[in-house]
Image (cartoon, rainbow, N blue to C red):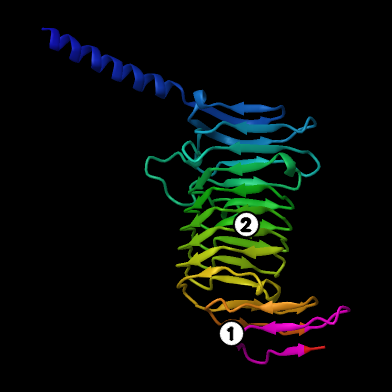
Amino acid sequence: MLNGLRFTLCMFLILFASANKAAGATNVSGNITTDTTWTLAGSPYIVTGDIYVYGANSPTLTIEAGVTVKFNQYRMLYIGSGATPGALNAVGTATAPIIFTSSQATPTSGYWGGIYFSDGTVDANTVLDYVTVEYGGYSYNSNISLNSAAPTIKNSTIRKSSGYGINASYSSPFIQNNTITENGTSGVYGNNSSFTITGNTITNNGAYGIYDSTGSATLLLGNSISGNGSYPVMMSVNQAGNVNTYGTNGNNLLYLLGSTVSQNLTMKNQGLPYLMTGDIYVSGASAPTLTIEPGVTVKSNQYRMLYIG
């Protein structure tokens, strides 16, 4: 009899805990115009309509460590809006990361829109640290999209987007020590973006590891890039002096855009040949020298030239 009572009590406690946890889910949508915190107690947050974080008072959405945010189909998180500022402070820990994901029972890539940072983003207050962003890409073809913004993204996992992991236009984000993996196209895409990408593991993306379409990156250094479907990296020749680690990718060449070397530069031997896809000019007021390390191979597409002076 006593054992039966104990069993019944245990089952009651388990059911009570489960019901209590389910009751803790918080539905969210609409505009956030004042400083707001999403707490662990309110997790998981279910995004049922697009979230907009901006207002005259420059609001910050703060998300506590360990919180899970689930997005219904097509939904987005927008930070800032043109001249109207806003910020996102999502700082987890190694043991309690913040998770942005699909609300599906079995998640699929591209189900929700992603996180969008506009030119209204208050960069100094915007940090993603120890977060996971996954299964986005319906809008802007990426998990994280930036338009004239410069957030810090570090120690995080960006994965399983239907398109890009991170898509930056006219932006200068700081991207450090992340794992960027299994995205449908490139891990990181940049257009006229002076981003800094250091210490990341960029693997198993559908196209490029890093696609710097205009050769505008400030620094590409110390990244481990392997298993991507196309070239490991597209970059300016001016990044050829910064060493990264390259494993096997779909095309085992370092894709160099046409560009100008205007300061002294040493092209490092990084274990893969360089592919010159546009003309490269070595010239400038400081009389720059291009030094090429022993063992380097430079291949060229048809009609391309290396101009000195």
Q: Which residue is most to the bottom?
A: 303
Task: Indicate whether 293 appears above or below 193.
Answer: below
The C terminus sits in image quarter:
bottom right
Task: Indicate whether 206 appears above or below 180.
Answer: below
Q: Nearer the viewer, residue 209 or 91?
A: 91
Residues shaded magenta: 282-307
Q: Nearer the viewer, residue 156 or 120?
A: 156
Residue 121: in sight, yes or no?
Answer: no
- Residue 3 position, x and y percent, is 13, 12
* Camera-nearest label, 1 or 2: 1
Q: Is residue 286 left or right of residue 34?
A: right
How far separated are the C-alphas under marks 1 and 2?
31 Å
Q: Which residue is most to the left?
A: 1
Q: Secondary structure at mark 2?
A: strand
Residue 167 shows which numbered tag? Answer: 2
In terms of sequence position, does the residue under pointer 1 or pointer 2 come before the other? 2
Residue visible at 71% across and 50% down? 150
Q: Nearer the viewer, residue 133 or 280?
A: 280
Badge 2: residue crowd in 10 Å (few <14, some 14–19, many ≥20): many
The image quarter in which residue 219 lies = bottom right
- Residue 82 position, x and y percent, is 78, 44
Q: What residue is shown with label 1? A: 296
Please tell me whether residue 302 belongs to the stretch shown in magenta: yes
Task: Indicate whether 232 appears above or below 175.
Answer: below
Q: Which residue is most to the right?
A: 285
- Residue 29 position, x and y percent, is 59, 31
Residue visible at 61% across and 72% down? 234
Q: Which residue is most to the front?
A: 294
Residue visible at 40% across and 23% down? 21
- Residue 58 position, x and y percent, is 76, 33
